Amino acid sequence: SYQKLLDLAENQQEKAWAYLHQGDLYLDHLNDVARAQLSYQKIIEECPQSNLIPEASLKMGDCLVAQGELDSAFIWYQELLNSNFGFIKSEELNFKLAEVYFYEQNFDSALTFYNRVISDFPKGVYVNDCIEKTILINTVGAVSAELNLYSDALFLSVQRKYSAAIEE
């Protein structure tokens, strides 16, 4: 168990890995966003020398999105992008900012960020997702009831409100 690993951890990095995995389990599988946030926060507070701080910080923003707090998540991601380690996670942060705009149905701003990822990171991890979304927005149009419904459904999914995502 990860709690036992935390108890046995001999250094900050081992402890940080255990907290990260614990947080991921809470967030991705147990739908316990509050406990996930606590795990990620512990990496930042208790493991200041860990190279997992950028990842934990990013996951804190993901928790805000999962809680439906898009304005807070946008500010969080923007601050991370402007931080000392923003360049390390620049592609992912720009993608996440685009996604926040998409969930807010601000499709023109989402396009700007998706296109930034495509142009700045042409071989990046998120480029295919960005291409897909830009094609969708450009095909259906930024002012579309269908696009709004799709955005709502995706946002409900990231909030782990799966029944509502299916029904709406």
Image: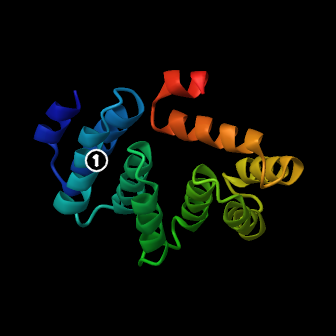
Q: Report the side of 23 relative to 28 (left or right).
A: left
Instruction: Tell me: residue 30, above or below residue 67.
Output: above
Instruction: Tell me: residue 165, above or below residue 90.
Output: above
For residue 100, which quarter of the picture?
bottom right
Residue marked by disc 1: 37
Residue at 77 percent of width and 62 percent of height: 122
Pick out the residue farthest to the left.
Answer: 7
Closer to us: 79 or 123: 79
> Which quadrant of the rendered structure holds the N terminus?
top left
* Residue 102 x %, y %: 63, 53
> Which quadrant of the rendered structure holds the C terminus?
top right
Q: What element carries label 1?
A: helix
Residue 14 visible in the snapshot:
no
Q: Callout 1: 10 Å neighbours few (<14), some, many (20+)?
A: many
Closer to us: 143 or 58: 143
Q: How many marks?
A: 1
Residue at 37 percent of width and 38 percent of height: 24
Residue 94 visible in the snapshot:
yes
Q: Give the colouring mode of the picture.
A: rainbow
Residue at 67 percent of width and 61 percent of height: 110
* Residue 18 x %, y %: 26, 41
Residue at 71 percent of width and 47 percent of height: 129
* Residue 114 x %, y %: 71, 61
Q: Report the side of 34 relative to 135 (left or right).
A: left
Pick out the residue farthest to the right.
Answer: 139
Instruction: Tell me: residue 98, above or below residue 87.
Output: above
* Residue 88 x %, y %: 51, 68
Q: What residue type is labelled 1?
A: Gln
